[in-house]
Structures are given as C-alpha cells and as structure tokens.
Amino acid sequence: MPRSLLSGRPGRHFPFYYPPAFLLACLPLSALSLFGAYLAWLAATVALLVAALRQAGAGWAGLAVLVLSPAGILTITTGQNAFLTTAPFVLAGVSLFGGRGSWGSASGC
C-alpha cells in the first residue's frame, strides 16, 4: 500500500534498479523542479549521445533517426538513462575500432 500511495496512482510504481552511485549523477538535478530536472536530464543525455555519435562520424540524419526511433521515444518519454549509457559504448567503439567515420559508415548514418 505505501508504495502505491507514493507513486501517484494506485497499483502503479516505478522501482529504482540503479546502483546507489547513480544518485550522484542525479544529485545536481535535486535543486530543480521535477519538470525542470526532467528537461535538464534529457538535454544533458541527448547532448552527450549526440557528441559521442558525431565523434564516431554519424551524420545529422542518422542522429535524428536514432533519437526519434521507438527506443529513443521511449527513453525520452520515461526519462530513462539509455542515452547516457550508450554514449560511453560509442566512444569505446571509436577508440577500439578507429577514428571518425568507422562506425557511422558501418551503420549507414
């Protein structure tokens, strides 16, 4: 019962599956309102992903397709951390498989 009362709607809750260290990334957002924190989170994570994919050589059309894909829309509407998680993997791929353009050309972006 307490869980459903805190979630805003009876019978619906979103469990927090992230490690406690993830809260350090969220700490600066605590000074903002809920909607402001949501917008700041989206702006920061999308910017990080765009910067990583541009480093990989992805074009703007490919970035738009990725962000507006069903997975991207789900990430945007629920405020998940998929963009934040993907950016380091892209940068690791760039450092492992070569410089700019190697991933972008392979993915068709």
Image (tube, rainbow, N blue to C red):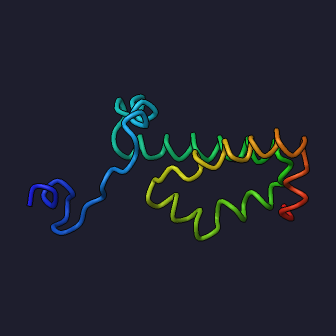
Q: Quadrant of the N terminus?
A: bottom left
Q: Residue furthest left?
A: 1
Q: Nearer the viewer, residue 9 or 22?
A: 22
Q: Nearer the viewer, residue 101 or 61?
A: 101
What residue appears at the point 59 percent right and 50 percent down from the top-left corner?
83
What residue appears at the point 45 percent right and 53 percent down from the top-left corner?
79
Return the x and y of residue 76 as percentages of the image width and height: 52, 58
Return the x and y of residue 85 as percentages of the image width and height: 58, 47
Return the x and y of residue 70 as percentages of the image width and height: 59, 71
Q: Is residue 73 left or right of residue 97?
A: left
What residue appears at the point 59 percent right and 62 percent down from the top-left corner?
72
Q: Nearer the viewer, residue 73 or 104?
A: 104
What residue appears at the point 65 percent right and 42 percent down from the top-left corner?
47
Q: Quadrant of residue 20?
A: top left
Q: Is residue 29 left or right of residue 4?
A: right
Q: Is residue 61 positioned above or below 101 on the image?
A: below
Q: Is residue 6 left or right of residue 44?
A: left
Q: Is residue 21 left or right of residue 60?
A: left
Q: Quadrant of the C terminus?
A: bottom right
